[in-house]
Image (cartoon, rainbow, N blue to C red):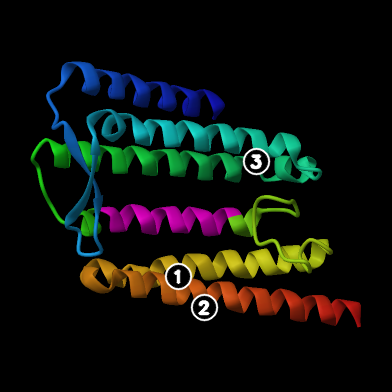
Amino acid sequence: MKKILSTLIILIFLAAIYLYFFVELPDQMVSHWNELGEADGYMSKFWGVFLMPLVALFMYLMFMFIPRIDPLKKNIESFRKYFDRFILAIMLFFVYIYVLTITWNFGITYNMTSAILPAVILLLWFAGDLTKKAKRNWFIGIRTPWTLSSDEVWDKTNKLGGSLIQASAVISCIGIIFPDYFIWFLMVPLLGSVLGTLIYSYLIFKKISD
C-alpha cells in the first residue's frame, strides 16, 4: 500500500508541474466555492496548481508518522489494512477535488457542491469503517477519557460510532437530491452520532466500573 500511495503522490506532483509550466491556466484561479456551488474565492496560479498536491503530501506524511509515535502502535498494526485503505480514500478524494478544480479553471463549469457530494459521502463511509475496526490508540478512532481507559469501552464505543458514521453517510445521500440542503443532511445526523457516541461511552464505562 505504501508503494501505491507514494506513486500516487508522485503522479500528483508531476501533473502539477506539467500544468504549471506547460498548460495555459488563468493567473488567478478559482479555488473556493460557496454552499450553492458558486465560485467565490481565488488564488494565484502557483497555489492553485500546487496547493492540493502539497496538502496531500502533508497528509500522507502525517498518516505515515502517526503509527511510529503512538504508545499503542502495536494496536494500530492490528487494523493497519483498514487504516491504509482510509489513507488511500483520502488521497483519492484530494485527487478528485484537484481534478474538479483544474477542469473548472479550464472553463468547464458545473455546480461544485453537487460534484463533491458523492466523494464526501464515500469518504465518510470509509471513516466509519475504519472507526469500527480501530483498536485502542491515541490518534485514530473515537477517543474519550472512557474509551482510552478501557479496551472494552473502546471496542463497544467505536463499533457503535463507526456504524452511526456510516448511517450518517447513508442519510446524507438525500443531499444529492436536495443539494441546497446537503449541509443539514450531513451535519445533523453526524453531530447527533458524535453526541450519542460520547454519551454511550460514558454509560458503558460507568456500567463496567460499578
**Image location (x, y in percent) of residue 167:** 47, 70
Query: On the rendered structure, is 81 left or right of 106?
Result: right
State which mark lies toward you, 3 or 2: 2
Name the image quarter holding residue 195.
bottom right
Amino acid on which the number 3 mark rests in the picture: Arg
Circles 3 and 1: CB distance less than 8 Å? no
Quadrant for the N terminus, please. Answer: top right
Residue hosting label 3: 80
Q: Is residue 83 above or below residue 10?
A: below
Q: Secondary structure at mark 2?
A: helix
Mark positioned earlier in the residue sequence (1 or 2): 1
Between 49 and 99, the one nearer to me in the picture = 49
Amino acid on which the number 1 mark rests in the picture: Ser
Residue appearing at x 22%, y 59% in the figure: 114
The single residue placed furthest to the left in the displayed view is 107
Amino acid on which the number 2 mark rests in the picture: Gly
**Image location (x, y in percent) of residue 157:** 69, 69
Rounded to the nearest angstrom, the CA distance separating label 3 from label 2 is: 28 Å
- Label placed on residue 168: 1
State which mark lies toward you, 1 or 2: 2
Magenta stretch: give its range: 116-130
Circles 1 and 2: CB distance less than 8 Å? yes
The number of numbered discs placed on residues in the rendered structure image is: 3
Residue hosting label 2: 192
Q: Secondary structure at mark 3?
A: helix
Query: On the rendered structure, is 27 left or right of 168?
Result: left
Residue appearing at x 52%, y 41% in the figure: 87
**Image location (x, y in percent) of residue 98:** 29, 38
